[in-house]
Image (spheres, coloured by chain):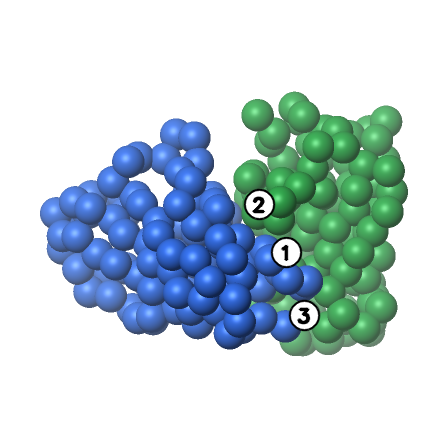
Amino acid sequence: DIQMTQSPSTLSTSVGDRVTITCRASQSISSRLAWYQQKPGKAPKLLIYKASTLESGVPSRFSGTGSGTDFTLTISGLRPDDFATYYCQQYKSYPVTFGQGTKLEI
Amino acid sequence: QVQLQQSGPGLVKPSETLSLTCSVSGGFSDAYYWSWIRQPPGKGLEWIGYIFYSGSTDSNPSFESRVAISIDTSKRQFSLKLRSVTAADTAVYYCACRHSSGYYVSWAQGTLVTVSS
């Protein structure tokens, strides 16, 4: 299975900050990477797919880059609603696998 | 837009079978893979399996053939059965709608299933 490693595990931030979360795959996954946002007690929500394509309705302050093994999710101008846990997911190889999550906290 | 709603018991005894059902509104078709994913308390996400509209299925080998997924297109539902559960199967279980590429476009609210006697 492809291992997905996110860093950091926890990030202390503030409203208005620009934050970057990294996701690294144990082997190349081309651009077959998605990012999700999960709030406590809720299901994950798709933010980005194909590494950089914003899902419909997702604010433009979210952006994704990368290909191969290294990917980033950037949130420009953090808002209170953005404090959540973020997961990456590869869908290049069977079985699909997720990162362990990055929690944004104040 | 696809919306999903799960149902099923939140408590299952060890060695018994966990059963959950997911009801779909909007877009229940062969455009998607109808999937199950779980999340142990405080942990990450794990893909369990999926069923295609035609009835073909696939599941994560880590579940060692304990998984059965079925579909009832007339009721717009698909279901998960996980046999011989142990405490390690305690998790929030989600049904989700997977795009043909492999990412999950819509999720249900989740069901916390606790395995305990």
The colour of chain B is green
Q: Which mark is residue B37?
A: 1
Q: Nearer the viewer, residue B12 or A53?
A: A53
- Residue A51 location in percent, x, y? 43, 50
Residue B71 appears in which quarter of the rendering?
Answer: top right
Residue shown at the point (81%, 37%) measured from the top left: B53
Q: Secondary structure at mark 2?
A: strand
Q: Earlier in the sequence, mark 1 or mark 3?
A: 1
Q: Which residue is mark 2?
A: B104
Q: Which residue is mark 3?
A: B89
Determine the CA span between mark 2 and mark 1: 10 Å
Quarter of the image with the C terminus of chain A is bottom left
* Badge 2 and badge 1 both on one subunit: yes
Q: Is residue B82 visible?
A: yes
Task: Name the N-terminal-most of marks 2 and 1.
Answer: 1
Amino acid at circle 1: Ile
In the image, is residue B45 above or below residue A75?
A: below
Q: Secondary structure at mark 3?
A: helix
Q: Badge 2 local density, few (<14 within 10 Å), some, or many (20+)?
A: many
Q: Colour of chain A?
A: blue
Q: Is residue A92 left or right of residue B61?
A: left
Is label 2 on the same chain as label 3? yes
**Which residue corresponds to the image point at 69% horizontal and 37% vertical from the top-left?**
B32
- State which tag comes first along the sequence, 2 or 3: 3
Marks 1/3 in contact by CB < 8 Å: the verdict is: no
Instruction: Write down the chain letter for disc 1.
Output: B
The image position of residue B16, as x and y in percent, is 83, 67
